[in-house]
Amino acid sequence: MKKRLVLTAAAATTLAVMCAGAVQAQEPAINLYSARHYSSDDALYASFTKLTGLKINRVDADDAGIIARLKAEGSASPADVILLVDAARLWRGEQDGLFLPIKSEPLEARIPTGLRATAVAEGTPWFGFSTRARVIVYDKTKVKREDVDTYEKLADPVNKGKLCIRSGSHPYNLSLFGAVLEHMGPEKTEAWLKGMVSNMARAPKGGDTDQIKGVASGECGVAVTNSYYLARLIRSNSPDDRAVAERVGVVFPNQSSWGTHVNVAGGAVARYSKNVPGAVKFLEFLASPLAQNHFANGNNEWPAASSVTFDNPALKSMTAGKPFKTETIPISAVGANQVKVQQMLDRVGFK
């Protein structure tokens, strides 16, 4: 009799575990593949869960890793939402058929056409949610602002031995160079890349923050960086970081010509999403005033949505509180040019 009771208890325990697992499996959730590795985004995701009851299961990787994973998983992919931090990679994912075009009135109303994919009959494949400018920083004690106020001048002999920059093959630079190719054509762009190699103070290495610190330390006279890296230093609680930011000047290049190159971070619904309504709801949340202000104040990016105001003293100080001119070339052109750019980099020895 006792043995029978023990077996019954064991069976009850097993059943309880199975039921708990079933409840957990049915918990409303979306699966997010994200190239955004910013701790400040944790609060953003928590706000979404609180508002909607949808839990976020996140997988982190870089843009290339996410695209490769989606291709490998195919229709078995559990991904619902994809977040990437480079416009050309968003374009690549679209070209590879990894995104599900969607129709959303809130997204179409809030995100300007220049910061989203071209719509097709089924909808729009992806939307941009924040931007960051590719700016030039310079040593205010040794370099004249007028010698570095365009991207072209990075290759001018006046800047011989002064330039610091991260790898030419990094997505941020590939997108910039792809944009320059669209503006200047192949012959002039390759000559420009060769001129930058001649002007380097050292071989490309490190990230954008390292380039800024290289200028502040005197190792470099001029460097290229995404704007939010400089904004982080300006807002840092570290006196050393703020000292670095104070040592350098910043230029938003080409204000008298085509405008400053701006890269886009954005998102899409995964092609084989098992929770399309939840995925669309998440993208619409990212375009809301709450999330757009978070991109500005939490990670020092410019909001993509129109009519969003924000109060970030670092971003305002970088632009003297005034809007800056941005280039207007199609994102598709930037993406399509990258193979040609990489070949140019190989030919001129830009590592």
Image (cartoon, helix red, strand yellow):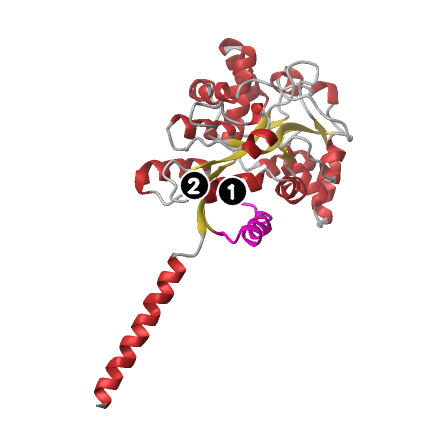
The residue beneath circle 1 is: 281
Residue 42 within the segment the image draws in magenta: yes
Q: In this view, does 320 lie to the left or right of 18?
A: right
Q: Position of residue 222 (x, y in %)?
A: 66, 27
Mark number, residue 276 = 2
- The image quadrant that residue 294 belongs to is top right
Count of residue discs: 2
Q: Which amino acid does label 1 sit on?
A: Lys
Q: What element carries label 1?
A: helix
Q: How far apart are marks 2 and 1 (CA)?
A: 8 Å
Residue ID at (63%, 29%):
133
- The answer to whether marks 2 and 1 mark residues whose Cβ atoms lie closer than 8 Å is no
Q: Earlier in the sequence, mark 2 or mark 1?
A: 2
Q: Position of residue 79 (x, y in %)?
A: 40, 43
Q: What stretch is highlighted in magenta?
A: 35-55
Residue ID at (69%, 36%):
216
Residue ID at (52%, 54%):
53
Q: In this view, does 14 lie to the left or right of 184?
A: left
